[in-house]
Every structure is written in structure tokens, then in C-alpha cells.
Image (spheres, rainbow, N blue to C red):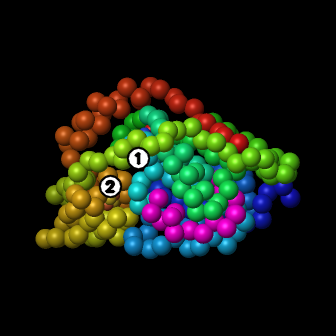
Amino acid sequence: MRMLDKIEFYYFSPTGGTKKAGQIFCEGFAKETVFRDLSVQGAEAAQTESEWIVVAAPVFGGRIPGVVTEKLKKLHGEGKKAVTLAVYGNRAYEDALLELNQTLEGQGFRVEASAALIAQHSMAPEVAKGRPDEQDRKEILDFAENVLDKIKEGLGTPVKAPGNVPYKAAMNMPAAPVSLPSCTGCGTCEKACPTGAIVMKDGTAAADLEKCILCMACTAACPEHARVLPPPLSERMEQMLGALKDVRRENEFFL
Ligand SMILES: Cc1cc2nc3c(=O)[nH]c(=O)nc-3n(C[C@H](O)[C@H](O)[C@H](O)COP(=O)(O)O)c2cc1C
Ligand code: SF4
Ligand code: SF4
């Protein structure tokens, strides 16, 4: 009976790693999880009904993607409690966890526990490949136990996440994935794009560089594997991140 009865799990997970890591936590934290996907194009997040929420967002350039923050800023916390998870690709999470917490606190939630978790890098999949793995799973489930202990002990002070204010400048890369000739024009990527950046044109998918946040949802969704980063950008990522292939960063937990 230690687990909570019901929680709502708000997540933004263009390529699935954030959801996977957050879901492990939810499994150990509550008997029932209601999923609230923040990536649905143009849709506002449903208001919170449960006493506890779990919020998981990926780290983009050391920050939380703006589209996520905008949606969270429509929620009414009214003293409800939150566990926050910033999920990053083995480089660094910088100001992202602090930003996530401050956003939720600004909406009236009490952030009781937080974690910075590792998942496979969505732009350089050889980095942190396969994570969260079995070891991560064990650590995340232990963390869920520890949060339940904190609740049993009557909660204490809200959690303090590392990071700086002002936050580092938001990533600004006017680029987007491109479609290969094998694109069939099926439109799956258009529906999957959280920012509405893709329009179907002449039987292929074209992205508006101003709207694209390089989240990689379209590449993950394409059934033909026909959506890729432009080769020069892909090479740059490889140069920037290649050295992290052999590094294993550890998950960090804050209570
Ligand atoms: C545009 C972009 C920027 C990213 N910036 C960072 C970063 O600053 N630090 C890092 O460690 N990982 C970074 N990553 C990797 C993601 O945080 C990581 O792969 C995350 O798990 C992606 O979530 P998803 O699998 O739910 O899409 C970035 C990925 C993308 C697409
Ligand atoms: S076009 Fe850009 S914003 Fe849209 S899914 Fe692809 S990478 Fe993400
Ligand atoms: S999902 Fe793939 S095949 Fe379908 S339109 Fe997009 S790029 Fe083309």
C-alpha cells in the first residue's frame, strides 16, 4: 500500500527516451498512471486532477524546449505536488532541471523531488546508446522508493535543483531534418511534429526552419527511415558528441 493510488504523467518525448525513463519512475511510484502527452500539436495539456504529478522533459541545449514550458505555463498547480525529471543525452543538463522546477513552482506546484536522468542521445544515437538500461531502471526505481519514504515521513522542504539564473541562452539552430528520395509522402511525420513545422509539398515533407526545434520526432516516426539530419549537421554533431560515446554519466537524484 506504499505506492500512491494515481498520478498524472506529463511528458514530452519526441524520440521516446524521456517517456521511457519517466515511465519507469511512474511504475515504482503509483498504482495507476494517467498519461498526458505534451507533444500533441496545437493541443493544450489537460489540467491536473491528481494530488501528484510527474513531469518529464528532454534537455535541449541545456534548457527545457520552449514548447514544453509554454504548455506547462497553462497548468494550475494549486498546491499539488510534483516530481520532475530532466532527461538528457549524456552531455550535460545545465539549467534545464532548475528551469523545469521554477516553471512548475511559478504555476503553484510544490516540487518535492527531482532527477536528471540519462537517455540515448536523439541526435547522436551512439551516445548513451540503449539507455535507460537495466542499471538505470534499478536506480530510478530506488529513487521512487526514496520519494515514497519522503512522503511517509511527512515531506520536508521543496527540492533544490542545480542550475543558474539567468538560464543559458536558448538553443537557436535554424535547421531541420530533410526527406530522402525514398520518402513516400505518407504524412506520418507531419502529424508527429509537435510544432507544426512540416508541410507536405510535391509529395514529400518539407519543414519550416523557423518552426523546427530539431526535436527528431519526424525522424523517429518515419516508417521508411527517410527523414534524416542534413549531412553537414549530422557530421557536426558527430564531431561535437563523438567523444561521449565512451563516457557513462550517472543519473542524479534530488530529494
Ligand atoms: C535539439 C536537441 C538538443 C539537445 N541538447 C542536449 C544537451 O544540451 N545535453 C544533452 O546531454 N543532451 C542533449 N540532447 C539529447 C536529448 O536531451 C536526449 O537524447 C533526450 O533523451 C531526448 O529525449 P527523447 O528521447 O524523449 O526525444 C539534445 C537533443 C536534441 C534533439
Ligand atoms: S520538423 Fe523539426 S520540430 Fe518537427 S518533428 Fe521534425 S525535427 Fe521536430
Ligand atoms: S514519414 Fe517519412 S515517408 Fe512519410 S512523409 Fe514523412 S519523410 Fe516521407
Q: Is disc 2 surrounded by few (<14), some (14 to 19) or many (20+) residues within 10 Å?
A: many
Q: Nearer the viewer, residue 253 or 181?
A: 253
Name above or below for residue 38 compared with residue 161: below
Name above or below for residue 98 compared with residue 179: above
Type of the residue with mark 2:
Ile
Q: Earlier in the sequence, mark 2 or mark 1?
A: 1
* Quadrant of the rendered image containing residue 76: bottom right
Disc 1 on helix, strand or loop? loop
Q: Position of residue 178 (x, y in %)?
A: 21, 55
Q: What stretch is highlighted in magenta?
A: 69-83
Q: Nearer the viewer, residue 178 or 49?
A: 49
Q: Position of residue 154 (x, y in %)?
A: 84, 51
Instruction: Give the residue displayed 56% in from the left and 52% down from the top.
Output: 102
Type of the residue with mark 1:
Phe
Instruction: Give the residue displayed 41% in from the left and 61% down from the top.
Output: 67
Q: Position of residue 22 (x, y in %)?
A: 59, 52
Mark 1 Cβ and ligand 1 under 8 Å apart:
yes
Q: Which of 220 and 113 is in front in this view?
A: 113
Q: Name the residue under label 1.
A: 60
Q: Name the residue under label 2.
A: 213
Q: How far apart are marks 2 and 1 (CA)?
A: 9 Å
Instruction: Give the residue displayed 45% in from the left and 63% down from the top.
Output: 70
